[in-house]
Image: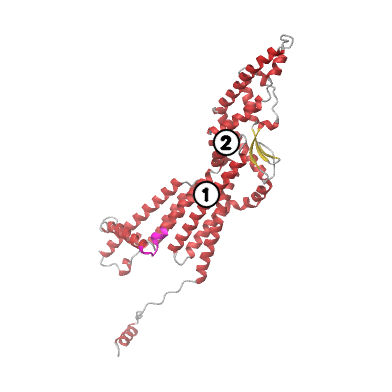
Amino acid sequence: MSDESQNRANAAATGAVPAQTSNPEPARPSRGRGIAAVVCVVLAALLTTPAAVAYWGQRTLNDTQRFVDTVGPLVNSPEVQDALATTVTDAIEQQVDVEAILNNAFAGVITDRPRLQQLAGPIDAAVDGLIERQVRTFIASDEFADLWVRLTTRTQQAMHRVLTGEATGAVSVQGDQLVLDVDDVIAQVKQRLVDRGLTIVQNVPVPQTDRQIVLLEAPQVKQLRTIYAFSNPVARWLLPVVGLLYLAAFLLARRRPRMTVAIGAVVACNALLIALALSVGEQLFVNQLAGTTFGPASRVFYDTLLAFLQRGQQVLLAFGLVLVMAGWFAGSNRYGTAVRSTVVGGLEGIGSRLGAGAVAGAGRWVLANIAWLRAAIIALGIVGLLWGNDVSLSRVWWSLAIVVVLLACLQVLVGAGRQAHSSDPTAGPSELAQVPLGS
C-alpha cells in the first residue's frame, strides 16, 4: 500500500477529513464585470465637466446667500467702483444744465448774455467736479457696501427671474441686452449732493437709459433659458451621480490600482477641459463688453462670479493627480512595488520594535482588521474634503496629509501586531500572513 493510500485509510479510520493535496484553481474574474467597470468610467468621464458646471450654476445662481458671498468682494474692486461711479456721475451731470439754471436765476438782473456764458463754464466745471467727488466718496463708503449687499441680493433674485422668463427687477433683459439698474445708487448720491447744498439736482429727472449698466449683450437669452430649464432640475444630483459612477468603476474593476490610475487621469483631464472652457468664456465675455462702461471691470467681474468653479477646477486637478499617484503606488509595477516595499518595511520595522510593549494588543487587532480600517480612513478623507460644499486646494492637501498620516500609523501598528504574533508561541501561522499596503 502506498503512503498516500495508507494516509487515506488512517484518515477514514479516525474520521478526519484528508487535506487537499493541491490548491484549487482560482475562479477567473467575470468578463461582464470588467465591461461594466469600463462603461461606468466612460460615462463618468463624459459627465464630469457638465456636472461640475451645472453644480456651480445651481449652487451660485440659485442660492441667494452663496451668490452674495461670491460677488460681495466686487464692492472693493477699483474697476467695478470706477464703472459704477462713471455711470452714476454721467447720469446726473447730463441732466444738470448749468446755463439754463443761470439764465433762470439771473433773469432781469443780468441782460448781457455773453457775461452769463462766461459764468456758465467755470460753474459747470465746479458742479461736475462736486458731483464726481460725491459719487466716488459714496461708492467707497461703508454705506455703499451695505447698499451693495442689498443690490446683489436683489440682483440674484432678478437674474433667477430672467432665467425663468420673468424680465423684471434690478436685472432685466431689454432688447438684446442684459442690464443692471442703478437707480438706488443715483437716488442716494443725489440726496448727499442736496445735503451739501447742491439743491439744483434734487428734482433733476434721470432717464431710464442713463440709470442702467449693460452687463451682457444677450441675443442668446432664449437659449440660455432653455438650457437652464432642462439642466436646473438635474444639476443638484448630476455631480453625486458622477461620483457614484467612479466608485462603481473602482469596485467592479479587476485590477483596482490600475483603475485608480485611470480614474485619476480622467478627472485630471476634465479639470484641464474646465480650465480651457473658463479661459475661452472669459475672453468672449470681455470681448462682448469691450467699449462699454463696464468693459474695464468685465474681467474682474467674470473671475469673481466664477470663483467657485475655478476653485473646483483646481481641486479636481489636484485630486486627479493624487489618485494617479495612489494607483501607481499601490500597483504591481516595478517602481511602485519597490517604493511600497521600502515604505512598508520601514513603517513595520518601527512597529516591530514596539510589538512587545503596550501597543501589542492594538497591533493584533489592527492586523486582523486592516482592510476595512484602510477603507474607513480613505472614506474619512473624502468626507472631510467635501464637507460643507466648500472645497479648496488647502482642504485637499490637509485631507491628503491626514489620510497619509493615519495610514502610516496603521502600518506601524501592523508591524507591532506581526511582532506580537511572532513572539507568541500559540499564534497560528495564518495570523502572520502578509498584509501588503496595496491590498
Magenta residues, as a range? 326-334
Q: Residue furthest front?
A: 114
Is residue 62 in sight in this rendering? no
- Give the residue displayed 65% in from the left and 50% down from the top: 227
Asked which colour scheme the image uses, the reply is secondary structure
Q: Pointer 2: residues within 10 angstroms few (<14), some, or many (20+)? A: some
Amino acid type at mark 2: Pro
Please give left or right for residue 340 compared with residue 262 in the image.
left
Q: Residue furthest top?
A: 109
Q: Which residue is mark 2?
A: 296
**Between 376 and 78, which is closer to the camera in this rendering?**
78
Q: Residues within 10 Å of mark 1 (few under 14, many from 20)?
A: some
Where residue 386 sits: x, y (%)?
48, 50
Q: Earlier in the sequence, mark 1 or mark 2?
A: 1
For the C terminus, which image quadrant? bottom left
At a point 34% along the width and 85% down the height, the residue shown is: 12
How far across and how far down the image is residue 348, in percent? 30, 59
**Hey, which quadrant is residue 105 in on the image?**
top right
In the displayed structure image, the side of residue 420 where residue 151 appears, left or right: right
* Label drawn at residue 275: 1
Q: Is 120 situated left or right of 68 in this image?
A: right
Query: Quadrant where the N terminus lies?
Result: bottom left
Most frequent secondary structure within the magenta stretch: helix
Of 237 and 271, nearer the camera is: 271
Which amino acid does the dot numbered 1 rest on?
Ala
